[in-house]
Every structure is written in structure tokens, then in C-alpha cells.
Image (spheres, helix red, strand yellow):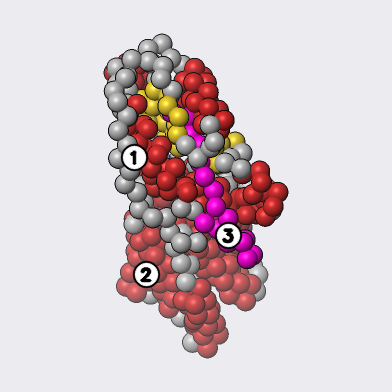
Amino acid sequence: MGLDVSTLHIAIIGALMFAAVVMGAMRRVHPEETTLTTWMWANILLATAGLLFGWQGKGPDWLTIIVANLASVTGTGLYVIGICQYFGKPARPRVFVPLLVAVMLGELYWLYVEPLLWARIVNVSLFTLLTTGYAVYIIARARRTDVQIAIRFLLFGFGQHVVLFLTRIAGALVYKPDTQYLDPHSPFIAFALMLMLMDVFVVNTSFVLLVAEKLQRRLTHLATIDELTGLLNRRAFNDKARGLIADATRTRRPVAVLLMDLDFFKLVNDRFGHHVGDELLRCFAEVLQRAVRGGDIVGRMGGEEFCAMLPTANRREAYQVAERIRGLAAEVVLKAGDARVHTTLSAGVAVVTAGDTLEKVLARADRALYEAKNGGRNRVILDVTGDDTDDVEIDLEWAPAPAR
């Protein structure tokens, strides 16, 4: 049983329209994802081109050849622009638009001035080859993601496109065809259409998977990261901290908690405004990330309260880190009009002991923090619960905070 060319042609148009509907539905849910809009219109234009190509011999040449090819090359270009948008690469409209104009001028010339079908085939195919080749280049250089299989299939789809149009160019140059209509009995055309149908499914499905992964990363970021400071939010910090405590219990290694609070933060907000308070929180978040060690986790627990979890740190090491953070925080200076805004930090330090939960160790760190506040602020107080009784030796070494 042979492949029916007309049926394959209709199937390609249907697949393109279905892909456009899927992209449009995703776009309604995530309007900020501009790549979905780009690929939706690419599929619409390519489906329109397919409909017009199928009408050749029945409709006017300007519509079934000129407009159809314009829709086809523009749709292919939008595919590539969407790839550029997704991977954060330049779409190069200054190159794309002149190329598009040159292709359409060539189509007009070889249709009306010097009619040459093979020249028009080479003309359009060369544009498609260049644009999809650029897409292959971008995809091949893309960073690794959680959906490498989608990257590979996308690369396969566009790579197949390159091979298909290289073959088309070679065939046009060698055989110089003189008929522009689809031969319903040609096995080569049927095979090419079958490859194109597969290409539509592979490329669009792969791209949907990539966009879905990007949206999932964005949602995960929103769910776990504090928007103002860029640190872990309370829930995400607690989840990671519980894992660290479980690991410390299993391996019998120490782990410490620092609970920190900016002193007189409410007065800063009341006197200078919330925008200055927000900037102060952002600056302290930078200080905190610079002061902790690799492997430590930090988070904003709410308001002006921050927390750090220090794996493998005993009481002395945790105290030294807390003092380093306090010293760096004291060096932060913000300008608010003619005034200069300073801040200090109070902190409570607790070490996880046998049978501790996150809630228990946080409660002890909170009591130490409360003692630091009542003792005059701008100090670190150590919780003395547990067996780690090594002397605290303070060895402070920190770099000056950048001028602001």
C-alpha cells in the first residue's frame, strides 16, 4: 500500500494547526512566555502556506506561489526566532528581514520576469537551510537542562530539516524540474512529506517540553526564593535545613544554626521609608551570602529576620561565622537623601544536639537571639545546650563592605 500524497499534505496542515492550538492554549495560561506566541504564529503561517500550496493550479499564482512562499519562509523564520528567544540568543532581525526581502524578490523575478521553477525552489530552500542551520547551531550549543531528551529531539528535528532541504536544493539543481504541482504518484515526494509530518510532531513536541520545563523552573523559583533578597524563603529553608539535620544525625557530624535580626529595622522604615528598608535588606542578604561558607544555606525567615544553617560547624566555628557576619553588617552604609543609614545585627547561635528537630534548635537559637536583643543588641549570643563545650576563640577576618 503506497503513501497517499494528498493525505500526507492534509495531515501536515492538521498537525501544524494542532500545534498552533496547543501553543495558544499554553500562551493564555502563561502570557509572559513570548516564545509560545512566536511559535504559535509560526505554525499558523506554515499551515496557511500548506493550504495555499495545495490550491496551486486552481488559484492565482500571486496567491498560491508568492503569498504561500512568503507565509512559508516567515513561519520558518519565526521558528528560529522562537528558538533564539528561548535560549537567550540574538534573533538577528537585521539579517533575517533583508534575507526575507531578497527571497521574495527572487520569487517574483523567477515567476514573472524569467520563469524558472528550479531557481525558485533553490531560492526558498536556501533561505530555509540558512535559518534552520542557525537553529541547529544554537540548539547544539545550548546549556544542559533537565530535559536533555527534548534538546536532542529538537536538534534531530531541525537537523532533519537541514538534510531535507539540502536534498531538495541538490535535486532542483540536477533535475531542473519544470512542474510545480505535487505528483500524487511520486514515492520521493510521499517520503519527503512523511518526513515533514514527523518533523512537525518532533519539533513542536520537543519545544513544548522545553517551555514546560522553563515554566516549571520559574514556578519552583517563585515557590522557594524570597523575591526581595534572592535568598531561600522560610518554607524552602526549613525543607533544606531538615535534610541537613537528618544527614548530621546519621553521620554524627555537627551542624549549627544562626538566627539573625537587624537591629532597629522598624525605625529605619518609619524614618526613611520602606524603599530604604528594602534596600537595607538586599544589602544584608549580599553580606550574608559573602560571609557564609560553601555548603551553608541561608534564608529570609520573614521581615528583618534571617537564618543560616552551617553543616559540620561546631559551636566555636559557628560563633566565628556569626561574628564575621555581624562585623560586615556594621559596615553597610546607605544614603537616604542627606542622611546616612547604618545598621547593626543581633544573632543567636545554637548547635544541633542528639534527638533535636529543626523546631527545637530554632527555638534555642531564638532564645539566644532574644538574649542578644535584651543585652543591648549588636552582639552574638551562644546557646550553651549540648555537649560541645570547646572554648570560643574569636578570630575575625572580613573584607570591608563595598561603598554604597
- The quarter of the rendered structure image containing the N terminus is top left
Q: Residue at x 35, y 65 (%)?
A: 166
Our reading of the magenta stretch's main secondary structure is strand
Mark 2 / mark 3, whichever is N-terminal: 2
At label 2, counting other C-alpha atoms closer than 10 Å, the crowd grade (few under 14, some 14-19, many 20 or more) is many
Q: Residue at x 67, y 55 (%)?
A: 272
User: Given the image, on which type of amino acid does mark 1 rest?
Assistant: Arg
Nearest to the observer: residue 317 or residue 64: 317
Q: What x and y, as percent, mark residue 191?
A: 41, 52
Tell me the residue that label 2 is attached to. 169
Q: Taking the image as drawn, is residue 334 in sight?
A: yes
Tell me the residue that label 1 is attached to. 293
- Return the mark for residue 340: 3
Mark 2 or 3, which is nearer the eye?
Answer: 3
Q: Residue at x 58, y 59 (%)?
A: 340
Q: Taking the image as drawn, is residue 25 in sight?
A: no
- Classify 81 as above or below 269: below
Mark 2 / mark 1, whichever is N-terminal: 2
Nearest to the observer: residue 229 or residue 26: 229
Magenta-span inclusion, residue 364: no
User: Given the image, on which type of amino acid does mark 3 rest?
Assistant: Arg
Q: Residue at x 52, y 83 (%)?
A: 105
- Return the mark for residue 260: none
Give the Cα distance between marks 2 and 1. Answer: 59 Å
